Image: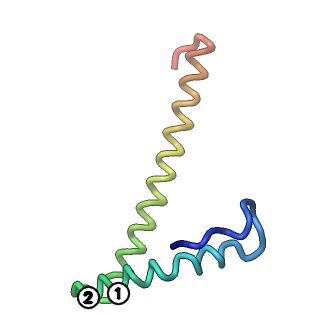
Amino acid sequence: MIGRPREASEYPDRSIDCQEAMEPGFQAIVDCMLEAGWSRGETLRSLKRLIAADNMTQKENARTEAELAIARAMMRAGKPF
């Protein structure tokens, strides 16, 4: 079970609490990868790449959503986009 934040909004040490909640799952992933024959270095590099790819995906999704919002607003205003 993953622990929840102590509060719904921001608070000091929230990111530390998140890290602590994630630690058991992270260790389980690393352990499974090692048991499957991957090295610790390969595993950690791959996790970093997955995080970078997710960040890029989130940025692209936000950009696309902004472009769609602009296009919708222009259509409502009767302007070509």
Q: Position of residue 33 (x, y in %)?
A: 29, 82
Q: Quadrant of residue 36?
A: bottom left
- Residue farthest along the top direction in this orientation: 78
Q: Position of residue 41 (x, y in %)?
A: 34, 87
- The residue located at (45%, 78%) in the rendering is 25
Residue bearing the label numbered 2: 35
- Residue farthest along the front direction in this orientation: 1
Determine the secondary structure under disc 2: helix
Q: How is the image coloured?
A: rainbow
Determine the secondary structure under disc 1: helix
Circle 1 crowding by C-alpha within 10 Å: few under 14, some 14–19, many from 20: some
Q: Is residue 76 left or right of residue 52?
A: right
Q: Is residue 68 above or below residue 58?
A: above
Residue bearing the label numbered 1: 31
Q: Is residue 5 left or right of residue 19?
A: right
Q: Is residue 32 left or right of residue 80?
A: left
Residue toward you, 5 or 14: 5
Q: Quadrant of residue 40?
A: bottom left
Tell me the amino acid under the disc marked 2: Glu
Q: Disc 1 vs disc 2: Cβ atoms closer than 8 Å?
A: yes
- The residue located at (48%, 60%) in the rendering is 55
Q: Is residue 16 above or below residue 58?
A: below
Q: Position of residue 5 (x, y in %)?
A: 67, 68
Tell me the amino acid under the disc marked 1: Asp
Q: Quadrant of residue 53?
A: bottom left
Marks 1 and 2 sit apart, C-alpha to C-alpha, by 6 Å
Residue toward you, 80 or 45: 45
Q: Is residue 74 above or below residue 31?
A: above
- Residue farthest along the right direction in this orientation: 12
- The residue located at (59%, 73%) in the rendering is 3
